Structure formats: structure tokens, C-alpha cells
Image (cartoon, rainbow, N blue to C red):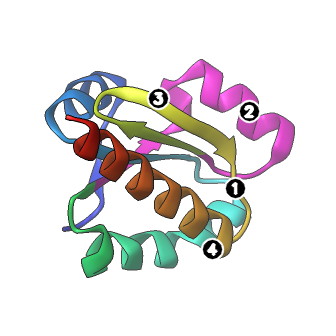
């Protein structure tokens, strides 16, 4: 699967249509965003995360994400599991993104097992 560019409205729809969603809020003037773009794209095509939808959103359309990015100068990531926000933070390294993805995968597996 590839990274999907969307907005807040698309995000609200997608988080309810798919069990796992990782959203990356980014801006044009963010060096860390540029640094994490290739690994984010690579993770979206990784077989381990084939049931995760990867979204990219512009922070200018989301005031909360914009405030976080302005404060920490890094992209803002949000992980959703079955429509519920599970984790959100500014991330600076590929390893941090992988950790969030791994946690998201575990969370979904636990919920599926509980059903």
C-alpha cells in the first residue's frame, strides 16, 4: 500500500474504515519531516504492516498538530486502532516511527483476540 495524502475530513472517515491507521502530519519547512519521508513510505509497503493505512496530512489544516510541530520542530504522528486514538507524539527518528507502528500492530492484535 502507498501513503495516502488526505485532510482532516478524510482522516475521520479512514480511521473508521480500517483497523489500523498511522497518520503523519507534516509541513514543507520541516527538515525532520523530509528525513522521515523515505522510511514512512518504505513502512507503508512493508509486508509486516500491510493491514495498516498510512496517511500524510498538511499541518496547516490541523491547528493541534501545527502547535505541536511548531513547539518541537518535528512531524506529528497519530496512531489509531479501530477508530480510537491510541498514541500521538512528535517523532524524530525512523526507530521511533517503527516503535509506534509495532505498538499499533500489537494493540490491534490484542483487540482482535478479545473479540
Q: Relative to 71, is 9 on the left or the right?
A: left
Q: Nearer the viewer, mark 3 or mark 1?
A: 3
Residue that numbered label 3 is attached to: 85
Q: Quadrant of the N terminus?
A: bottom left
**Alpha carbons under labels 3 and 2: distance apart:** 16 Å
Element assignment for label 4: helix
Q: In the current view of this chain or complex, which residue is farthest to the left? A: 17
Name which of mark 2 and mark 4 comes first in the sequence: 2
Q: Residue 53 at what x, y percent from top left? A: 27, 53
Task: Give the spatial CA distance, label 2 vs label 1.
Answer: 11 Å
**Segment tinted magenta in the rendering:** 53-76
Residue 66: x, y in percent?
Answer: 66, 30
Q: Which residue is mark 1?
A: 91
- Neighbourhood count class around disc 1 (C-alpha, 10 Å): few under 14, some 14–19, many 20 upward: many
Residue identified by numbered label 2: 68
In the depicted view, which residue is nearer to us: 77 or 112?
112
Amino acid at each position: 500500500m502507498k501513503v495516502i495524502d488526505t485532510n482532516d475530513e478524510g482522516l475521520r472517515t479512514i480511521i473508521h474504515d480500517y483497523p489500523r491507521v498511522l497518520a503523519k502530519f507534516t509541513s514543507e519547512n520541516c527538515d525532520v519531516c523530509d528525513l522521515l519521508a523515505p522510511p514512512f513510505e518504505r513502512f507503508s509497503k512493508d509486508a509486516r504492516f500491510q493491514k495498516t493505512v498510512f496517511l500524510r496530512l498538511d499541518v496547516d489544516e490541523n491547528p493541534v498538530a501545527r502547535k505541536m510541530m511548531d513547539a518541537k520542530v518535528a512531524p506529528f504522528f497519530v496512531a489509531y486502532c479501530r477508530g480510537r486514538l491510541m498514541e500521538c507524539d512528535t517523532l524524530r527518528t525512523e526507530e521511533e516511527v517503527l516503535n509506534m507502528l509495532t505498538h499499533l500492530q500489537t494493540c490491534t492484535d490484542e483487540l482482535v483476540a478479545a473479540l
